[in-house]
Image (cartoon, rainbow, N blue to C red):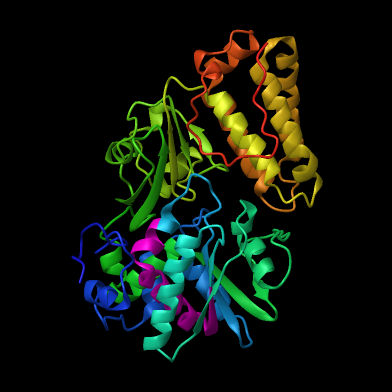
């Protein structure tokens, strides 16, 4: 049994190998369960850990209200963000905690099948999860069936409607949804989609209850959370932290640069923040007062020697490549935004014109996509123009910062076909 008020929780008993089902029961207890799991989930205040931060209990209640048989629980472990590693770490240490949480969700909504989705491009993780699913099936013949699915990896493939679309036998593309949350379906069956970390937290809450769960975190964002820390670090690191821990302390624990020029919060659809926020609590209820959130649990430290504009351009260009290309904002808007930003970085008179054009293009594209992918890129670009304003002025004046010419890069961007570097005149 894990101590009531301590960390780690999600990584309790973790080692270099995935815990077996027997080890899982030894660590977390074999039969401990709360009497009313839905009420405990409501009282826990658990927010989804996939990025949107939607209350998990409300999503469950929405699915419970749906009639019909053959409901599904979908465990989203696609991890499409290049800077994210938390799904891999969690499923490589405590896979049964994730599966147990998925089973608890299935019982709450009346689902008879669980679809665990892991990108086929990650064969090590596929193997870990496959073994855990088989082990669980051998020891528990009752309850919802668990199926492992391996969609192809793409950034947008992890978007919940794209994932459900693929499970329904169609292309891995986001579906247009005017309002969220909305009910997704596989065939005629309603589907509840939660990411791996959310499922693991559900398992803990249905074992130990809301009061125990809320002994960590803040009032509006309780519990612990998993953070992927990359960038200016000794090595990419995954940490479980108490929600509300200052951002600077997270960097220190990850052996990252604790005095960076900026930090990227929430991944490649997130925002850059300056050093003035390093001592802010890492919690949605606090960051939300500044229009920010922890997003998908990604923190990237950018050192002072780097050029934030060049780093941002690499991401924007990749995000344009990764778009669904099923609407104008993705197919045409994002590549044009990437080109505008490249021209801004080159500077000079053309750069000044490009900056104006970039701001106008962002305004015309925002909110017009079939999904939220363009909006995330625009949010990222706008934060870069604000946080790196001093470097921006230097570039536009034709005197780019020293970091722009450096070959060292800090944001992980998968290779693109016909990759081209910016040409400096």
* Left or right of residue 362, residue 332 in this image: right
Q: Image quadrant for the N terminus?
A: bottom left
> Is residue 233 toward the left or the right of residue 166 in the image?
left
- Quarter holding residue 217: bottom left
User: Is residue 55 among the parts visible in the rendering?
Assistant: no
Quadrant hosting residue 316: top right
Residue 406 visible somewhere in the drawing: yes
Q: Is residue 112 magenta?
A: yes
* Residue 35 coordinates in the image, percent (x, y): 32, 84
- x, y percent for residue 326: 79, 52
Nearer to us in this view, 128 or 246: 128
Count of numbered tags: 0
- In front: 42, or 154? 154
Quadrant assignment for the C terminus: top right
Magenta range is 89-115
Residue 236 in the magenta stretch? The answer is no
**Residue 180, how many percent across, how many down?**
63, 61
Which one is in front, 332 or 141? 141
Q: Residue at x 30, y 65 (%)?
A: 213
Q: Depth check: give the residue in front, 100 or 322.
A: 322
403, above or below 113, in the image: above
Q: Residue at x 69, y 58 (%)?
A: 174
Direction bottom: furthest residue: 142
């Amino acid at each position: 049994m894990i101590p009531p008020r301590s960390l780690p929780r999600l990584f309790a008993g973790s080692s270099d190998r995935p815990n077996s089902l027997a080890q899982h029961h030894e660590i977390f207890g074999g039969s401990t369960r709360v009497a009313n799991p839905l009420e405990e989930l409501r009282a826990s205040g658990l927010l989804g850990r996939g990025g949107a931060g939607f209350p998990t209990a409300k999503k469950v209640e929405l699915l419970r209200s749906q009639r019909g048989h053959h409901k599904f629980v979908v465990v989203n472990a696609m991890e499409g963000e290049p800077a994210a590693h938390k799904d891999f770490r969690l499923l490589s240490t405590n896979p049964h905690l994730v599966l147990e949480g998925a089973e608890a969700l299935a019982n709450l909504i009346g689902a008879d099948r669980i679809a665990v989705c892991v990108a086929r491009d990650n064969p090590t993780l596929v193997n870990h999860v496959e073994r855990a699913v088989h082990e669980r099936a051998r020891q528990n013949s009752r309850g919802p069936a668990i199926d492992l699915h391996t969609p192809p990896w793409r950034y947008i493939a992890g978007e919940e409607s794209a994932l459900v679309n693929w499970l329904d036998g169609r292309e891995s593309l986001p579906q247009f949804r005017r309002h969220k949350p909305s009910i997704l379906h596989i065939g005629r069956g309603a589907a509840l989609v939660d990411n791996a970390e959310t499922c693991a937290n559900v398992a803990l809450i249905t074992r130990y209850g809301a009061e125990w769960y809320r002994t960590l975190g803040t009032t509006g964002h309780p519990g612990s959370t998993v953070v992927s820390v990359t960038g200016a670090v000794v090595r990419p690191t995954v940490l479980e932290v108490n929600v509300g821990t200052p951002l600077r302390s997270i960097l220190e624990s990850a052996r990252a640069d604790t005095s960076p020029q900026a930090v990227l919060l929430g991944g490649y659809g997130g925002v850059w923040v300056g050093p003035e926020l390093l001592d802010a609590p890492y919690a949605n209820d606090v960051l939300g007062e500044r229009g920010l959130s922890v997003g998908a649990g990604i923190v990237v430290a950018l050192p002072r020697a780097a050029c934030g504009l060049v780093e941002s351009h690499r991401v924007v260009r990749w995000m344009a490549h990764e778009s669904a290309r099923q609407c104008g904002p993705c197919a045409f808007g994002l590549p044009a935004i990437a080109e505008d930003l490249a021209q801004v970085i080159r500077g000079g008179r053309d750069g000044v014109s490009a900056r104006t054009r970039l701001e106008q293009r962002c305004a015309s594209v925002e909110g017009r996509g079939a999904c939220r992918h363009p909006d995330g890129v625009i949010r990222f670009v706008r934060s870069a123009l604000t946080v790196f304003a001093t470097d921006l002025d230097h570039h536009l004046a034709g005197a780019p910062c020293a970091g722009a010419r450096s070959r060292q890069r800090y944001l992980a961007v998968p290779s693109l076909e016909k990759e081209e570097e910016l040409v400096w005149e």
